Amino acid sequence: MKVALFSWEFPPKIVGGIARHVYGLSRALAKAGVETLVFTCEFPGAPREEKVDGVRVFRVDSYRAPTPDLGTWDYLMNQCMEETAAEILTSESPRVDLLHAHEWLVAKAAIGLKHTLRVPLVATIHATEYGRRNGLHDDNERMIHQTEHWLTYEAWRVICCSHYMANHVAWLFSLPREKIDAIPNGVDVTEFVGAFNRDSFRKQYALPEEKIILFVGRLVYEKGASLLVEAMPRVLAKTSSKFVFIGEGYMKEQLISRARQLGVADKAYFTGYVDEKTLRQLYRVADVCAFPSLYEPFGIVALEAMAARAPVVVSDVGGLSEIVEHDKTGVKVYHDNVESLAWGIIRVLTDPSYANYLRTNAAKAVLEMFSWNQIAVRTKKIYEGVREEYEKGTWKPLSAT
Amino acid sequence: MTFLHIILLTREFPPQVVGGLSHEMEKLAVELAKLGCNLDVVTYHDSSAVTETRSEGFQVHRVTNAVQTHLNIVTWALALNTEFQRVAADIAVRSADDEKLVHASEWLCVPAAIQLKKTIGIPFVLSLHSIESERSGGSVGPLTGAINYLEKEGCLESSKILLTRKSTAETLQKLYAIPNDKVTIIDLNKEHDILNQYKSVLQARVTRTELTSE
């Protein structure tokens, strides 16, 4: 089977989570025997064409004309991506069997190719504009929302990273729920191994006797960092700990100020953004990772923490609720509840054997359910199902009629 | 026996009337049908997305924009063109044995014409009543830049450019370095001349194929 993936970002171009997702998925698909092509945007220094672990990557010139805004840039970039992909896909034998678009940012190119090549299209919706903005407020957001709708409408099947997102997408776009598959995001456990000096690394963040409670995420309302600050006095009354907050966001000053009001500012460390390597090491030295989100389509940070063998305490919402099994691979606490959050953290910190039990189970679950190989197998199954339905139908390319 | 099959892409066609183009396209379609062309018109309409069979012997396929809210005319046109592609590809499959040619009217239909050429191999002629630099008075804004880009792509990718004025040909040559022999000045009232232009494009293609295969 030959599949073309479309994504506006692919390493070394990393803007958000899509680049990592497509990187992990495409390499695992190639490993699973799928001939995989990726069409993406150019990046300074990256070759226009290369092979990455069996995946053929094509980078498209995406700045051929001036444009007034991101939306116009994106639509015009899609025209260029579609042209490049058309030239490559029509010049090769065997022909491509299926197209797979990631997000609205490549919708026009993928839908256009679907109709001219007349091959089925699968779409992954990672997040929605409605969810990101908590509603639709201007024409830019409405255009993106309607483009997402168009993509889900045109797709043979839609993939979301959690059942929570699948239900959200079904509701938002009036899409039949049975058209949507939930396949989780993956994580590469090999990124969380390798020797490093734990003690000297740890000293940069906490005193030797302090437990590290790690939060990773944007410092915005929906990620729930404010709940963690509110929980600090309760946790500190029972344990000697340091709360490390990784990330930036509009609530940062407010959170620092609140920690000061609560008299716990010396126990909170707001690092801002950190590089990937530092982040992975932080997961590995953390005594507990807390993700008390109020809204979470997936919650990749919880998965990364589990892969790094850090016990997790998460709020029982969205994708987090599906990643973590309570009392087995982590601790689930009540949504928007400081007391419950403090209870979960204290439970893990004060019972080392329970913490180890969670670590072991979580690491096993990551390998069984969230490895890219597993995800590629499930994705390939969807491709095969789509192809089977397509083969039975009458909608075929010009050359095949 | 193969038939000459024209797929006419136009942003406006009656009852959708924005400027003078709509009625001109209708007259062209009617006359081409009379001259014996197999003809499908693919156009836009925001309320009645239907296929109409005209008594003159051709069909009009009206599509709507899949994305209703847009930032500007460029995003509007690019999204609409994908629908044009969808309908044109369906026509191409239904008329597999015909000798097909796309006639794209203005830059507004260039994105679909290029994709149909690159994926299905249908050549296209591009007709331009006016060009962006004439309309915008030489603006250098980013939106004009985006339209210029699509217009230029259309000129470069098309097999023939049909213009109504010699001055436009000179501007095109100056702006986009389009070779003069690719440009033909036509009188839109002489449909027979236009039909001959279509035939010359297809004939050149046949000749090229023969030369390549020799």
Image: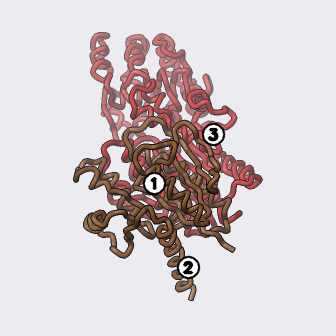
Chain colours: A red, B brown
- Disc 2 or disc 3, which is closer to the eye? 2
Instruction: Name the chain under label 3.
Output: A
Tell me the element at label 2. helix
Helix, strand or loop under label 3: helix
Residue type, numbered disc 3:
Met
Front tag of 3 and 1: 1
Binning the other alpha carbons within 10 Å of mark 2 as few (below 14), some (14 to 19) or many (20 upward) gives: few
Which quadrant, please, contains the N terminus of chain A?
bottom right
2 or 1: tag closer to the N-terminus: 1
Residue B206 numbered mark, or none? 2
**Quadrant in which the C terminus of chain A is drawn:** bottom right
Badge 3, how many Cα within 10 Å: few under 14, some, many 20+?
some
- Where in the figure is residue A346, as x and y percent of width and height? 48, 17
Is B197 placed left or right of A183 in the picture? left
Q: Residue at x 44, y 62 (%)?
A: B189
Residue A186 visible in the current orientation: no
Left or right of residue A389: residue B98: left
* Residue indicated by mark 3: A369
Q: In the rendering, at what x and y percent does residue B197 appear?
A: 48, 71
Rendered location of residue B178, percent (x, y): 33, 69
Q: Based on the displayed image, in which of its 4 quarters is residue B209 positioned?
A: bottom right
User: Mark 3 to mark 1: distance in Å?
Assistant: 62 Å
Q: Does residue B41 sit above or below A299 in this rendering?
A: below
Q: Nearer the viewer, residue B31 or A366?
A: B31
- For the residue labelled by badge 1, is the local secondary structure a helix, a strand or a loop? helix
Up-down: is A304 above or below B114? above
**Residues tagged by mark 2 and mark 1 found on one chain of the structure:** yes
The amino acid type found where label 1 is placed reads Glu
Q: Label 1 belongs to which residue?
A: B24
